[in-house]
Every structure is written in C-alpha cells, then in structure tokens.
Image (cartoon, rainbow, N blue to C red):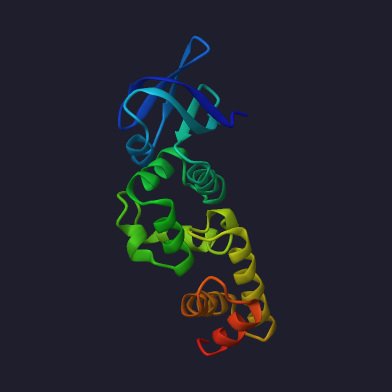
Amino acid sequence: MYDHLRGRLSARKPTHVVIEAGGVGYRVDIPLSTYEALPTSGDVTVYTWLKVAEDSLRLYGFATERERDLFQRLVESVNGLGPSRAVAILSNVSVAQLQRAIEEGDVDTLKKVRGIGDKLANRLIVELKGRLPDELTAGKGPESASLERDAASALVALGYESSEAERAVRKARRDLGSDARVEDVIRRSLSHV
C-alpha cells in the first residue's frame, strides 16, 4: 500500500522514528541498521511496509529498498516469522550477510541472531535458499546474477544437484572475475563439482 515515506525527521530512536509528512507524524518501526543510516535531523526517506492486523496498523521502515524487500520476503515466506522477529534479524546482520548465510546454508551465522535457534535457522535456509530475488544478491548486477543462474542451470541439466551447481558457479566466478563469459564459468565450474 505504501512504498515510501518522505518527510522531516521529528524523532529518532533505535527502534522507531517519527516522520512528519503533510502535517501528520508517522511512527515507523525500524531495524538498527536503518537507525544507523538515517541522519539525526532533517528530511529523510524510508521505504515502508504496512502490517495490517485485526486491531492495529503498524508501519515498518527501511533505509534502502533492498532491505525492505528482504524484510518482506522474510515475513511472507518463512512460516512463523513475524515482522518483529524479521526486524530483529535485520538489526543484527546486514542484508548481504543474511543472504550469504541463507544461500550457503550457514546455520552458525544465523544462530548468532538473538531468538534464532537451530530450528528457525534451518527453516530460513530451507524456505529461502535460491528464492531470494536477484536484485538482493549482494554486489551483483542483474547481468551477473543472470549469468550465474544460466551457468547453474547448465550444470543441473548435466545432472548435478542444484545446491552443488550453485556453489561451484560461485567459486568459478570468484576465480574468473566479473567479466567472464557464461561458457567460461560453466567450464571452470566443472572443476569445482
């Protein structure tokens, strides 16, 4: 319903901000990462997500669209993970760290977040691995993400497991650099599977 909110910052706390826009003060719950990214005063823009419950409306805000999109994916895709816990996760790890932990199946990194145990860490991995939008992929442009997806699909077509193919493609990309062609990545990936 709301994409973003732009206005004057009238209150800033580690858990929420109040943004005045059009004569109305909007209370917006935020993760610690957004608190750190926002200035102490002046005009700000936060990317928002609205939680509609039977008896309340709650607005969540983020410094970047990327962070908001990952938050939304956490809340909508992981069974039993509500907005408050998703904010807690994003307050403890960056978007890039969280995505890396999910894609690599790194349970230990996920368990470092308060309130996440073995069960929830494994659920995050199972329900989100390979399903995060390409634009969330840290440090990768759309062409890079597409190249990796194509190379991994080629390896899967050759009979390799999806997770094994993705791991091999990531290693090959690190070896070859950012200007490698898909054929080169596939060839190099074969040495990593």
In the image, 65 versus 16, the foreground residue is 65
Q: Nearer the viewer, residue 48 or 89?
A: 48
> Up-down: is 51 above or below 82?
above
Q: Is residue 71 above or below residue 29?
A: below
Residue at left 59%, top 32%?
Answer: 3
| Residue 126 falls left or right of residue 87 | right
Q: Residue furthest front?
A: 179
Which quadrant holds the N terminus? top right
Left or right: 16 with respect to 190?
Answer: left
- Quarter residue 119 falls in: bottom left
Number of numbered labels in the structure image? 0
**Residue at screen point 44% across, 68% down:** 105
List x then y, in percent, for residue 130: 57, 64
Q: Is residue 52 visible?
A: no
- In this rendered view, identify the residue nearer to me: 180 or 121: 180
The residue lying toward the viewer, choosing from 40 and 33, is 40
Q: Position of residue 140 (x, y in %)?
A: 53, 61
Residue 116 in picture, x, y percent from top left: 35, 53
Query: As displayed, is residue 114 above or below residue 55?
Result: below
Q: Residue furthest top?
A: 23
Q: Position of residue 94 (x, y in %)?
A: 38, 51
Q: Residue at x 53, y 31 (%)?
A: 51
Q: Residue at x 61, y 83 (%)?
A: 184
**Residue lying furthest bottom:** 191
Is any atom of residue 177 visible in this view? Answer: yes
- Please tell me in which quadrant of the rendered image residue 31 appears: top left
Describe residue 11's horizontal placement relative to residue 99 as left or right. Answer: left
Q: Which corner quadrant of the image does residue 42 belong to? A: top left
